[in-house]
Amino acid sequence: MRHAGAGGEELLNAAAARGRFANIPRAEKGEPGMDFTLETLLLAGGLFAAMLALLEVGRRVGLRRMARDSEGARAGAGVVDGAVFALMGLLIAFTFSGAASRFDERRKLIVEEANAIGTAFLRIDLLPPAAQADVRASFRRYLDARLAAYRALPDLVAARAELARATGLQQEIWAKTVAASAGSQPATMLLLPALNQMFDITTTRTMAAETHPPPIIFGLLVAVAMLSALLAGYAMAPARGRNLMHMVLFAFTVAGAVYVILDLEYPRLGMIRVSGFDHVLIELREGMK
């Protein structure tokens, strides 16, 4: 199925999708990419501070309970603690594994797009010699527009403009190729399907970029992390004093895991970047003679 009008892609849609998560800045306003990193760090920092506070609250609640009933203060608490900590571990493992697999899939799709464009570009040789130069020039402009959209981020207005230009060039390439391949069976059978694949990959990348866990999963992860801190603080009550090292390490580890998960989910906006694989498109452009 031909998608000559499919100009959206994961650079732009990743930013649009993040608007569905309340702690991530909205794409429509075109804020700088550093805003995403800053707000994600603030979220992780807020979780870290909240967990430290809840560890202390839980410890004080435990101390009061032990003062009233030292023997019954821990009765049955182990079962509850185990269930909550197991749930937190499951949520972290689930969200981290999913974010990492989607990150790898987005990198894979960059390579697939480069392969699709490269294959279609080579098959331009099947067109009549008089039409080849014009179609190749359109291909170069098309890839330039795609790369410019990558480079434009976090300026979403500029990225949208480049994507719109790429959409127009898709239609231009298709029209020129159909006209030039009239009466040429090899071009019709080999070049036009390659163009379909080249255009279709933009839709595939768009859908990959829009695939994220429901926001309630992230909310549940944060809520369970804070509940775990409360229960951990309660369990520390029998100690003579605060174990600051364990408290800080526990809060830092969980908050750090949440930060990495969010950064992996939006790899065009944070510190973890999928853009390192854009070099395959850049190298392809340099090879288009």
Image (cartoon, rainbow, N blue to C red):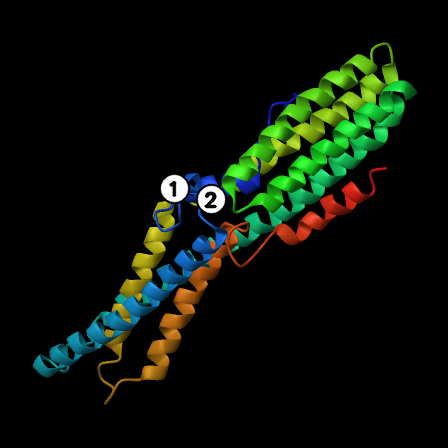
**Looking at the image, which residue is at 76% across and 18% down?**
176
Disc 2 marks a residue whose amino acid type is His
Quadrant of the image occupied by residue 88: bottom left
Look at the numbered discs 1 and 2 and tell me whether their residues touch, using CB distance below 8 Å.
Answer: yes
Q: Residue furthest top?
A: 183
Q: Which residue is mark 1?
A: 20
How far is disc 1 from disc 2 in space, using C-alphas? 10 Å
Q: Which residue is mark 2?
A: 212
Residue 7 visible within the image: no
Within 10 Å of disc 1 (Cα), the crowding (few <14, some 14-19, many 20+) is some
**Residue 59 as seen in the image, left or right of residue 250:** left
Image quarter (top left, top right, bottom left or bottom right) of the N terminus: top right
Disc 1 marks a residue whose amino acid type is Arg
Residue 162 at x, y percent in the picture: 60, 34
Residue 247 at x, y percent in the picture: 33, 78
Tag count in the figure? 2
Residue 233 at x, y percent in the picture: 26, 75
Q: Secondary structure at mark 2?
A: loop
**Residue 98 as seen in the image, left or right of residue 133:** left
> Is the residue 262 above or below the residue 288 in the image?
below
